[in-house]
Amino acid sequence: MNVATKLKKIKQEIQEVCEKSNRDPNEITIIAVTKYVSINRAKEALQAGITDLGENRDEGLLEKWEQLKDKPTWHYIGSLQTRKVKNIIHLVDYIHSLDRITLAEEINKRADHPINCFVQVNVSGEDSKHGMSPLEVISFIEKMKDYPNIVICGLMTMAPFTGDEETIRHCFQRLKSLQLEIAEKQLPFAPCNELSMGMSNDFNIAIEEGATFIRIGTALVGDKEKEV
C-alpha cells in the first residue's frame, strides 16, 4: 500500500475520532516518522500531502535534510545526546526530547533563535523509556526562563506498548493534566499548548485525550523490512 492510500485511511480515522471526542481534525498534526525508511519514501510522504517529518538520529536527519532542505517541517523525536545538539540545531523546527538541564544549556548555546521544545515526560515510569518524572516537570520548566533560545511549546510522552487500553489512556490523561497545569501559569517562555503523544498503535486514544502532534511511522511510511 502506498503512502497516499495509508494517509487517506489515517485521516479518515482521525476524522472519526475527532467527531466522537468533539475535536477539530485541523488541531492534529501528523508527523511522518521516517527514521527507518529511504529518502524516496520520505519524498513520497511529502507528495502525498504530509508536511512534517520526524527523525531520531542526527545522521538520518542530516541525510534527508541535505536532499529535502526546508520543504518539510522537521522534528527531532529521538533521545538527543548533548554532544550531538550542534549537528541538528540549525536543521530542526521542533525538538521533542528535552529532558535535562545539560541538554537545555547546549540547545540554548547552539541555537541562533528560539527553538520549540517539548519536555519529554516518562509518565509510565518504565526504565526503558527516557524522560523526566511528572513530579520534576514544573520545576524544570520554570528554570527555562533563563534560556532565551528555548520555548516550551508542550509535553511529549510514549505510552507503554501494551494491549491494555486503559493503561494507555491513563498515561495520556496524566500528560494532558500536567500540560493544562503548566499552560495555566501563562509563562511567556513556556506556553505549553501542545501535546506530542500517540504513535501507530495508539494515536486514536491519544487524540481522544488531547494530542495535537501524533508521530506515525509504521502505519504511514512503513519500515525498512516492509518498504517497497
Image (tube, helix red, strand yellow):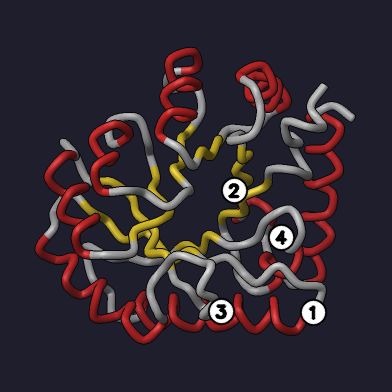
Between 152 and 103, the one nearer to me in the picture? 103
Q: Quadrant of residue 181?
A: bottom left
Few, some or many C-alpha atoms within 10 Å of disc 3 (few <14, some 14-19, many ≥20)? some
Residue 121, percent across and down? 44, 71
Amino acid at pointer 1: Asp
The residue under label 4 is 203
Residue 92, percent across and down? 37, 36
Residue positioned 21% across, 47% down in the render? 107
Residue 30, percent across and down? 63, 45
Most distant residue in the top direction:
67
Q: Is residue 203 left or right of residue 31?
A: right
Disc number lying in front (2 or 4): 4
| Quadrant of the snapshot with the N terminus | top right
Residue positioned 75% across, 39% down in the render? 220
Most distant residue in the front direction:
127
Residue positioned 19% across, 39% down in the render? 111
Q: Which mark is residue 29?
A: 2
Amino acid at pointer 2: Thr
